[in-house]
Image (tube, grey):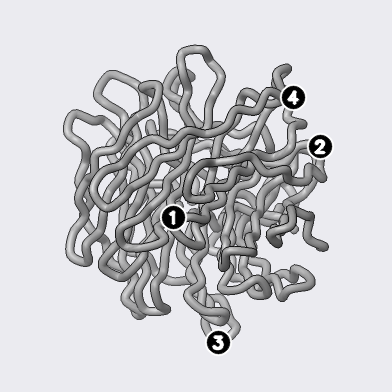
Amino acid sequence: MSGIRVTCCVVFCCLAAASSGRVGGDRLAPAPADELFHTSFFLGPGLGSVSCVSARACVAVGERALPHGRGTVLAERWNGSRWSAERTPSPSRRVSVLNAVSCPSAQACIAVGSAFAGRNRILAVAEGLRRGRWSIERVGAPSSAELRGVSCTSPSDCIAVGVAFEHGSGVALAELWDGHSWSLRSTPRPRGTSASELNSVSCASASACTAVGDAVPGVGSPETLVERWDGERWSIQPSPTPHGYAELEGVSCASTRTCTAVGIAWPRTGQRMPVAERWHGATWSTQRLPTRSDAPDSGLNDVSCASANACTAVGWALTPDLLADAPPRVVRWNGLRWSDQSAPNPHGGVELEGVSCPSLTACKAVGIGAHGPGVAENWDALGWSVDPG
């Protein structure tokens, strides 16, 4: 397995790495160090997202490494016993990646991502799986943009989100798929901010989608950003920003009135902390997460809720000496509290990027190893285990 999730930083920069990325051998000009936020310690190919319609039917996407520092889109399919690579067209001869995937059925998926176009430009990418074949779809995005999240309620109804780069700044981006074409949907910019981005989206119905990310005040640190789609337009929902410096990376809505979002906060102490927030149909509130003494520096990248009382979130953790050899961070919500789960650490350090739980007793998580290829892990209500290749 291989693949990598590319993420462009909220303040007009595109880096590569498992979450903030290595884009092959090419790099877009980074923002100043004090403007960078979420970065990964794991470089190399890997899997960035997974979508399961059942415990025996999943599709994962990411990047496959090529010679000479290049990379191309990757999709793999799980049939209940093994993973196999899918044939996917490459949107770029240099570097391209699929950041997210959503499968409303076993034979229909939409994946989104980005491709490096040279001259400090990144192009938004979308690919669709229909009748057993992947094909590239034309995206109506601005000239430089990246899609990071997608959610489909049917093969003809999907929402994708990300960031567009305009005049040296990032602006939250949203697109709608109607079964035939993609079209832009205007997103509001939080008042007084200089940049914004949306990292993930979850749709409980075609008229109830929640997207999360972050926004940067004119002078200040990133704050959480939550936007809601009602089938006609996007609107901002107020959300807390723990420690005054946080971003949301993943969201899952078990119903039209219940959503859970996760991410990372960076207190002034310097050690990053995982964040979980909950929406009960009226307001967002911060949830308490357990601490890990063996890995105080950690964050959460994604979450999946099989029901309002059963959510699993995954991410990364670092040991106190900042070596990337800690087991990945996995936490489970049971309706009352979050608790840590033990997950395998097959490559001397694993960052889990995506998770999908098709039922109360089944979850699949994918990611990247610190010293090895991509990884997929399975939860069967008894515990986590590494999938066979």
Q: Disc 3 marks which amino acid?
A: Arg
Per the rendering, the mark at residue 286 is: none
Per the rendering, the mark at residue 323 is: 4
If you read the primary sequence from the N terminus, does the residue marked by circle 2 or circle 3 appear first?
3
Instruction: State the residue position of label 2.
Output: 348
If you read the primary sequence from the N terminus, does the residue marked by circle 1 or circle 2 appear first?
1
Q: Disc 4 marks which amino acid?
A: Leu
Side of 190 where 14 appears, left or right: right
Instruction: Tell me the distance, in whole angstroms, between the alpha carbons under discs 2 and 4.
Output: 10 Å
If you read the primary sequence from the N terminus, does the residue marked by circle 3 or circle 1 appear first?
3
**In this view, 356 is above or below 292:** below
Measured as percent of width and height from the top left, residue 241 is found at: 35, 29
If you read the primary sequence from the N terminus, does the residue marked by circle 4 or circle 1 appear first?
1
Per the rendering, the mark at residue 252 is: 1
Q: Disc 1 marks which amino acid?
A: Ser
Where residue 189 sits, quadrant-wise, is top left
Measured as percent of width and height from the top left, residue 342 is found at: 72, 43
Numbered disc 4: secondary structure: loop
Where residue 1 sits, quadrant-wise, is bottom right
Q: Residue at x 61, y 68 (%)?
A: 59
If you read the primary sequence from the N terminus, does the residue marked by circle 2 or circle 4 appear first?
4
Instruction: State the residue position of label 3.
Output: 131
